[in-house]
Amino acid sequence: MTQRWHNWARSAESHPAIEVQPRTIDQVIASVQRARETGHTAKPIGASHSFSAIGATDGVRIDLSRLRGLVSADTQRGQVTLWGGTHLWEIPSILEPLGLALENMGDIDRQTITGATQTGTHGTGLGFGGISTQIVGATIVTGTGELLTVSETEHRELLPAVALGLGALGVLVTVTLQCVPRFLLDVVEAPAKFDEVRESFVERSKAVDHFEFYWFPHTEGVRTKTNTRVPYDGPGQDSEAQPLSPVSRFVDEELANNVTLGTLLFLQRFAPGSTPSINRMIEGVSSRRTYTDVSHRVFVTHRRVRFREMEYSVPLEAVPEALSEIRAVIDRRGLKISFPLEVRSAAADDLMMSTAHGRASGYIAVHRYWRDDHTEYFREAEAILAAHDGRPHWGKMHTQTADALRVRYPRFEDFIAIRDRLDPDRVFANPYLDRVLGTSSDSANPQQL
């Protein structure tokens, strides 16, 4: 028996029967075939940064950490092919010498490219889809041990499923991304009133390239972040960047977001009644600032304070009302919430299991310090968000089941049909996928590996 596995948030764990670290595609194929022959399940794992149990397995854990880096690049088309175990934080150093960048990113970059895309990780901006929408090709080891190439010219019909496949279709050993020319972001961070921003969220999101805001419960203020894209013509344009100074970045990201926040969250566990006052104190020191930097240094924030998260996509126009209801339930239940809510948006897309499938979407994420009991808060927030036709982020905590999700995803059954084709024996199943996608009628009795 290998060591117990747990995710970053300590919200999921499992006990894999065996762990393998393949160095080649052939070794990935052999691992899948061995699992299938012995009646075990298999699960590829990246950085274990999902808050849900989507990566848990008691079967064969396939660690992709040795399949990392650049496979090939087509600079004329702006496309790069990466090994599936490549971390998001490694990608800028690969793309910058090519004059390229990811079109959009989330605010955390600890995930692998396959882990991020298979769970539907996204950033913010109504003109931009999640990271999965940047996938234009992949090679995948299916549940039958077949190596399949999916691209705009080969098995194209599978791409809307494979690009965001929940880890249910196979092991993505490589992904090909459509990148964009390198660019800068002009940033404006500013305090504002909660009700004003809540009511104008849709208009603000439509008016700029990237808009998001954070709200500390028990306060009347929020912190907004507006990013405007600026073309980057080459190294000579470095002079146009006006990034935060190393001292300012250290104070903001390390002292404020990690050391101070972590200390306050720990102390509030023992004095929860102090939470509203502390949140109002944090709100009171929020100030306006502007800067310009290369895209990935703006999108990403380094977060070391451990937390748990639930996030839902709702129709864009539903965001203001959903936020009002969440604030009301916090007050009504007397909840003491120390972590801020994060509110973002994304463009509609055509990926089968995307939370933004077929609709411009707003995203509301709620968090709790990992040592706090999240149960009541997440339950109340989830009920509100689900009632607004909400779709849960696949990599975040939620309680939805296949019966509920089937009616929220127009192509749910199409995805299941592709799953039946690529993984008929459910080699890549686990309890999480059984809950959100349904179980197979077939059962197997695991033999010894």
Image (spheres, grey):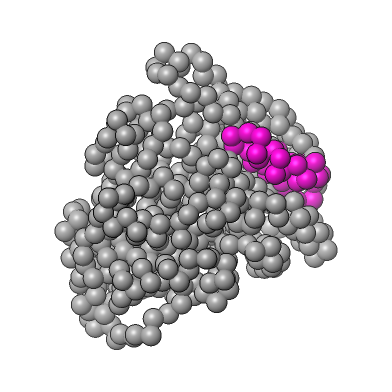
Whole-percent x, y for residue 335 in the image: 76, 61
Name the residue: 41% across, 13% down: 236
The total number of labels drawn is 0
| Foreground pick, 65 / 389 | 389
Name the residue: 65% across, 40% down: 205
The image quarter in which residue 280 lies: top right
Name the residue: 35% across, 43% down: 177
Query: Vertically, is 116 above or below 91?
Result: below
Q: In this image, 206 relative to 331: left or right?
A: left
The quarter of the rendered structure image containing the C terminus is bottom left
Whole-percent x, y for residue 279 in the image: 75, 46
Q: Is residue 120 visible?
A: no
Tell me, yes or no, whether the highlighted magenta stretch contains residue 276. Answer: no
The quarter of the rendered structure image containing the N terminus is bottom left
Q: Magenta residues?
A: 194-223
| Foreground pick, 283 / 440 | 440
Whole-percent x, y for residue 283 in the image: 76, 39
Whole-percent x, y for residue 288 in the image: 71, 27
Q: In this image, 231 relative to 277: left or right?
A: left
Name the residue: 37% across, 40% down: 178
